[in-house]
Structure formats: structure tokens, C-alpha cells
Image: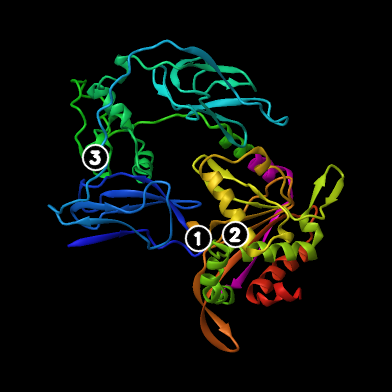
Amino acid sequence: MTTEIKVPVLPESVADATIATWHVKVGDTVSRDQNLVDIETDKVVLEVVSPEDGVVTEISQEEGATVLGEQLIALVGAAGAVATPANTQAPATAAPASEGNPVDINVPVLPESVADATIAAWHVQPGEAVSRDQNLVDIETDKVVLEVVAPEDGVMGEHIHAEGDTVLGEQLIGKIIAGAAPAAASVAPASPAASDESSDVLTPSVRRLIAEKGLDAAKINGTGKNGRVTKEDVDNFLKAPAPAAKSAPVAATPAPVGERTQKRVPMTRLRKTIATRLLEAKNSTAMLTTFNEVNMKPIMDLRKQYKDAFEKRHDIRLGFMSFYVKAVTEALKRFPAVNASIDGDDIVYHNFFDMSIAVSTPRGLVTPVLRDCDKMSCAEIEKNIRELALKGRDGKLTIDDMTGGNFTITNGGVFGSLLSTPILNLPQAAILGMHKIQDRPMAVNGKVEILPMMYLALSYDHRLIDGKESVGFLVTIKELLEDPTRLLLDV
């Protein structure tokens, strides 16, 4: 009997997903509830587990592939099933050590608005082989992560600056030996201890569980593939009796049961910047939030009717964000103060419509900018949002992608948020929060109907925007979404 492994059902506002990491390969024996693969969407990582014990017989979508909800990605057969032979790799043999030419590895040129940066992560250690264009190190600025790649094949030399060091633009941070090959010792079989350390990769769910329990991952013995720590390993670690303590005076306080550890890590530059800007927004503006709700049935019906033809014509799925952006753009035209900002004692009115779209990335929340939204079609909006989301996920956003923006849209609905009060993205004067679409009983023409409803939340700077304008702005968005024809007729 063969069991199909499929992508989970994706939220309505998520168009597609990406195969992030396969934790098994063809031919591997798997157990029920074992995590097989991580599926990454624009905002969250989903784990797909095996529904039963068996053997992986086929993997049809490799890492990096773009997939749709409920798409078939693998097959699991009964124990003893014959698997499609997996690709095998010949044992690595070390090339004889050879000399080469030292090449400097420098920090990229930083933009004018960025004073310095931080060494976030070295991906290659001294003595390891590197290939041309391989990412050597991540350099983190206040807003983006820059990758520094190897200019040539060779061997990694010294790290002049370690992770966590503050560096300047074009500063020397390391060297590679171009044309050299690693010494035999550098590719010798690793010791068990080294193997355990190199395989200390945690799935998102295990990482969350360890953080929630305040545990030290290094102390947990991994029984998964390549020493990977599983949820069962964490549970067993918590259930294990504490080591017997040495004899102590009778009056001593009994030792607490289980592990009570802490882990202290410095904030990343991005997290510190986010914290500073959010606190500044709370303390320096007269921020107020107003709410409304919208019946999403007309949009959902329209999307259902045309999504296949739309995707066939434009090669992109029709999501909800293009409708949101279109409606917000039209509302900004009607209420210019919402599209304005305060600069000292002046009000700056913008006659263009650049929209910041909040995107959650592994390093934190970022708001890349979708420019000239009034000139874009729905297909162009969907394609540009997808491009920004993928760049955010992969750490490829540039300073230009992050600069500007007159208004922000944030969609907590993909995480299940029913209602929120979003914080302003300075120097913008307003931000719109979209939320989970939920069936609720509503009164329609004196009768109760079950409708897909969504709460809208508009946070705004009351110094610039009055209550009448904020409510009118939100009502305009509600009317446009509940009757999409208005977007076409401009009424």
C-alpha cells in the first residue's frame, strides 16, 4: 500500500509555498508522525509528517521547488517496499594540498545611510574548500542581510573578524587561498563528537519546544537521522531523572526537579532596529486605532470564478493581496491626509502611491515597498508581492527594496489573528491590519446569514488624521471590497 504525501492546505491569502528542507531521502525508513519535510510559505514554515510507518519510495519535488496546496510531493510505501534508488554519492577524497594565492574578502560597499554592519554568520570555516560564488559570510545591517561570496575556487583562509564583530564598508574580514585544495586532514572522517556537533540542526517545532522549556540543545542526545534532535528526544530528556546530587546538609533546600537553564543571546541588528522603531512610534505619535469589518464573499466568489483563467493568462495565482492593494490605493486617493507624513512642523502630501507590505522573515518583520501601486494591474501586484516575499525569505532584500513607502499593509490573518492594533511604520501616518477570514452569523435584510467576515484595523497618527478621515478611509475600503465593481467604475 502506498501513501501519498501532499502539501498541507494553504491559507486563502497564501498563493503557493516552497520545499525548504527534506529530512529524509528515498529509501529511508520512517515512523508515524516523523517530520518528513519543511514547507515554507511567505510567512510561516509548515511541517509535513508521515501518517504511518513505512519507507520513502519517491520524492517528486526537490528542495527549492515551488508547490501548491495539496500538491503531491512524495510517496511512502509499506515497510519492505522497494524504493526508487536514491542518488548516491561517492566517498569524498581529498585532493593533495596545493599552494594558491591569497585573496581578500571585504565587506561590501554600504549605502550612505548605513554607518556600519555586523558579521552575522560565517558559513565556511578555515581550511574548508570553497567554490566560486559560494556564500562565505552574512553581513547584517540595520535592515538587510548582505551575502559575501567567494570570487574564486579555493580554500577558506583565516577569519579576521568573528561573528558578532562590528565592521565598516570595504573592511577586510577574511581571506581565501585561491586555487588551493584542502589538506587531507580537513576532509578526514569526523570524530563522533564532531559529527554530533555538525548535525545539530533543529526543526522549527523542536526549536520552539526547546525554547519554551528553556533547555540547552547541546545537552539533548539526538536519535534522529544524522543525530537530529526529535520531539521524542526532548520529551525523554525532560522525563529523565536529574543526576544524583552529592550529599548535602539536611537543612539544604531540595534541588528542583528537571532542568532549569537559561540561554542569553544578543539581539540581531535587525531585531534591535525593529524594537527601537516600534518604541519610537508608540512614544512620538498620537496613535489611535479604529475598526470595521468586511464581507469577503464577493471577493471570494470573484476569485473562485476567475482564478484558473487568471493563472493561465498571467502565470501567477490570484490572491487577496491584489484586491487589498487596489482598494487601499483608491482610498488613499480620496483621503490624501492618510497618504501624507509629518516632517517637523510641515505636512508632506505625496502624489504617488508606494505601499509597504509587512513580511515575516526568519530574521524578523520587514516592510519591503511596492512602488507606484496606482499604475499596476492585479497580476503585476501579485507578481511583485511574491518577488518581495521570496527575497525576504532568502535574505535577498536590498536597501532600495526597503526604502520609502507612504502606507503599510500587514496581514496577521495568515497566522490566525482575529483582531489586532498594528503599530505605525514611521514616518508613515497610518497602517492597515488585515485579519483572519471567519464565517460568522450576520443580519442581512432582516435574516441571519453565515458570511465570511474579516475585521479591518486602521492605526493612524491623530496629529495628522482626524477621526472623520480615518473612519471614511476604512469605510471606503470596506465598500470597495464588498463591491469590487466599484474599483472598475471608480465610484
In the picture shown, does residue 317 fall above or below 268? below
Disc 3: CA contacts within 10 A as few (<14), some (14-19) or many (>=20): some
**Few, some or many residues within 10 Å of mark 1 (<14, 14–19, 20+):** many
Dot placed on the residue nearer the N-terminal end, 2 or 3: 3
Magenta extent: 277-296
- Name the spot of residue 283 as percent of width and height, x first: 70, 43
Residue type highlighted by circle 2:
Glu
Under circle 2, the secondary element is helix
The residue depicted at 39 percent of the width and 46 percent of the height is 63
* 122 lies above or below 290: above
The answer to the question of whether label 2 and label 1 lie on touching residues, with beta carbons closer than 8 A, is yes
- Residue at image mark 2: 382
**Kind of residue at disc 1:** Ala
Q: Nearer the viewer, residue 421 or 369?
A: 369
Does the residue at mark 1 contact the one at mark 3 (Cβ under 8 Å)?
A: no
Q: Amino acid at mark 3?
A: Gly
Q: Which residue is mark 1?
A: 15
**Figure quadrant of the C terminus:** bottom right
Secondary structure under badge 3?
loop
Given residues 19 and 193, the one toward you in this image is 19
What is the total number of numbered labels drawn onto the structure image?
3
Residue 299: x %, y % from top left: 58, 73
- CA separation, marks 2 and 1? 9 Å
Where is mark 3, residue-wise? 224
